[in-house]
Image: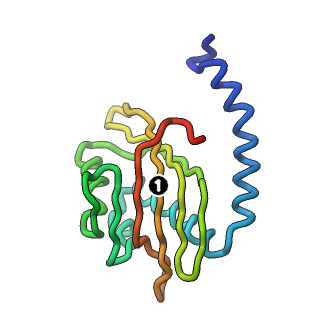
């Protein structure tokens, strides 16, 4: 059965799961260290910089010794290649319309915070067309003398559901 384009079963699953997920997110956030909260703020900044196509601010989040493996690349990349995927999108007249971060887990140990999350995002062409995508992302943040920076990471495409 369909309800305004949504499968009725999925609709009820979302209605029941969203309050549960919100409750879990509030509980998880309350248990996070100050350092983890700082890293999550920077994860949010990361996606705002992508949306604004602000490559300089985006690059400032990355440690000079970064190495990671984004799912858009067949091989691991270093800091000099981290903006390539954004440039490719913007050169194709695409714009990040919206995104939603769903925290999965984080851990602070000494001068490192590891974040794991799902990101649902929507890149649109100049006509406003596109499809939402979901990815899983892991970042390793290291505390430098001035700020936190990403020193490692990995991402992969993910199914539309997060659980």
Q: How is the image coloured?
A: rainbow
Question: Callout 1: 10 Å neighbours few (<14), some, many (20+)?
Answer: many
Q: In the visual, does 6 lie left or right of 154? A: right
Q: Which residue is the site of mark 1?
A: 137
In the rendered view of the protein, which quadrant contains the C terminus? top right
In the rendered view of the protein, which quadrant contains the N terminus? top right
| Residue 130 percent coordinates (x, y) | 38, 33
Q: Secondary structure at mark 1?
A: strand
Point 37% across, 76% down: residue: 63
Q: In the visual, does 9 lie left or right of 132? A: right
| Residue 143 percent coordinates (x, y) | 50, 81
Residue nearest the observer in this picture, 162 or 59: 162
Point 47% across, 89% down: residue: 145
Point 47% across, 50% down: residue: 136
Residue placed farthest to the top in the image? 1
Residue placed farthest to the bottom in the image? 145
Q: In the visual, does 144 lie left or right of 103? A: left
> Residue 158, relative to residue 101: is it above or below?
above
> Residue 118, relative to residue 1: is it above or below?
below
Residue nearest the observer in this picture, 140 or 39: 140
């Amino acid at each position: 059965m369909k309800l305004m384009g949504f499968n009725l079963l999925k609709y009820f699953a979302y209605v029941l799961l969203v309050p549960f997920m919100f409750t879990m997110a509030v509980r998880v956030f309350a248990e996070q260290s100050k350092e983890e909260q700082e890293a999550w703020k920077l994860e949010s900044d990361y996606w705002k910089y992508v949306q604004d196509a602000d490559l300089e601010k985006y690059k400032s989040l990355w440690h000079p010794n970064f190495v990671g493996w984004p799912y858009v690349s067949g091989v691991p990349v270093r800091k000099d290649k981290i903006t390539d995927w954004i440039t490719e999108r913007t050169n194709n007249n695409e714009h990040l319309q919206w995104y939603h971060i769903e925290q999965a887990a984080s851990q602070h140990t000494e001068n490192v915070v590891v974040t794991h999350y799902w990101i649902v995002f929507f890149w649109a062409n100049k006509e406003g067309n596109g499809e939402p995508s979901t990815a899983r992302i892991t970042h390793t943040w290291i505390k430098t003398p001035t700020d936190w920076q990403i020193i490692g990471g990995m991402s992969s495409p993910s199914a539309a559901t997060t659980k």
